[in-house]
Image: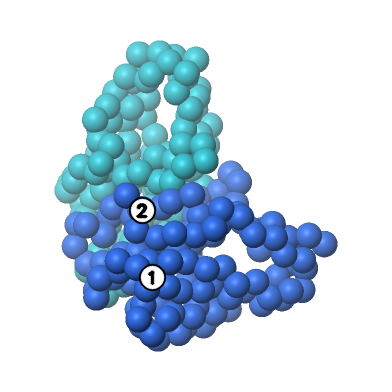
Chain colours: A blue, B cyan
Amino acid sequence: DAKTTQPDSMESTEGETVHLPCSHATISGNEYIYWYRQVPLQGPEYVTHGLQQNTTNSMAFLAIASDRKSSTLILTHVSLRDAAVYHCILRGNSGGSNAKLTFGKGTKLSVKS
Amino acid sequence: GGIITQTPKFLIGQEGQKLTLKCQQNFNHDTMYWYRQDSGKGLRLIYYSITENDLQKGDLSEGYDASREKKSSFSLTVTSAQKNEMAVFLCASSHWGSSAETLYFGSGTRLTVL
């Protein structure tokens, strides 16, 4: 049973800003929101994560709703290299249950030149 | 920075064959994982290991064995390959017990069973 809900696909054009939504209505207090992305023939690549506050790094900005039931990964000035499947997942803060990383199908982001 | 190396990248086996996949990491991470990814689907956990010589079963452990020979390496064995099976096996590692464990993945071993 998936704990997060994402659109199957989204399209963008180079240079645009993309907002990738994720719904996690049943998130528990100790669960972090992680984002990974995956391109063909590669394993998932870590993008960012957050608990409650918005976070930013060189790859993306993560906006987390105040009730934590949804989040949005924001990619600015997308390039062709950003085309990938983006996975939003929840993880507890430690313990064996962490290992059961539930990746769903994610959102396939296409980028046009 | 570090890297996770999985070997082989491509593996072709015969039905009933015992097949071994290897994974090495130089992050000095405590925990290592094996996941299976089927086409168009998410990841499913097969085995993980919190530290050297530790083994924990995941949701998909039946039909597989694993071995954590040392901190930097984690092997997975398909005990009897199933005909027409095709999947990608992903190895990952992380620090155990940190407040937010980030998993780092290898590029995968692609298995095809004839």
Q: Which quarter of the figure has residue B81?
A: top left
Q: Earlier in the sequence, mark 2 or mark 1?
A: 2
Residue sitting at 31 percent across and 30 percent down?
Answer: B77
Q: Residues within 10 Å of mark 2 (few under 14, many from 20)?
A: few
Q: Residue B71, how many percent across, how many down?
A: 27, 53
Q: Nearer the viewer, residue B21 or A15?
A: A15
* Residue contact between numbered discs 2 and 1, judged by CB atoms under 8 Å: no
Chain ID, mark 2: A
Q: Nearer the viewer, residue A102 or B107?
A: A102
Q: Residue B23, how many percent across, how many down?
A: 39, 44
Q: Residue B35, how many percent across, how many down?
A: 37, 44
Count the labels in the image. Answer: 2
Q: Gap between marks 2 and 1, in whole Å?
A: 14 Å
Q: Residue A74, how many percent across, how many down?
A: 58, 75
Residue sitting at 29 percent across and 23 percent down?
Answer: B79
Amino acid of disc 2: Ala
Residue A85 sits above or below residue B88 on the image = below
Residue B10 sits above or below residue A78 on the image = above
Residue sitting at 33 percent across and 72 percent down?
Answer: A32
Q: Which residue is mark 2?
A: A2
Side of A73 relative to B16 (left or right): right
Q: Secondary structure at mark 2?
A: loop
Residue A21 is tagged as: none
Q: Which residue is mark 1?
A: A33
Amino acid of disc 1: Ile
Residue sitting at 43 percent across and 80 percent down?
Answer: A64
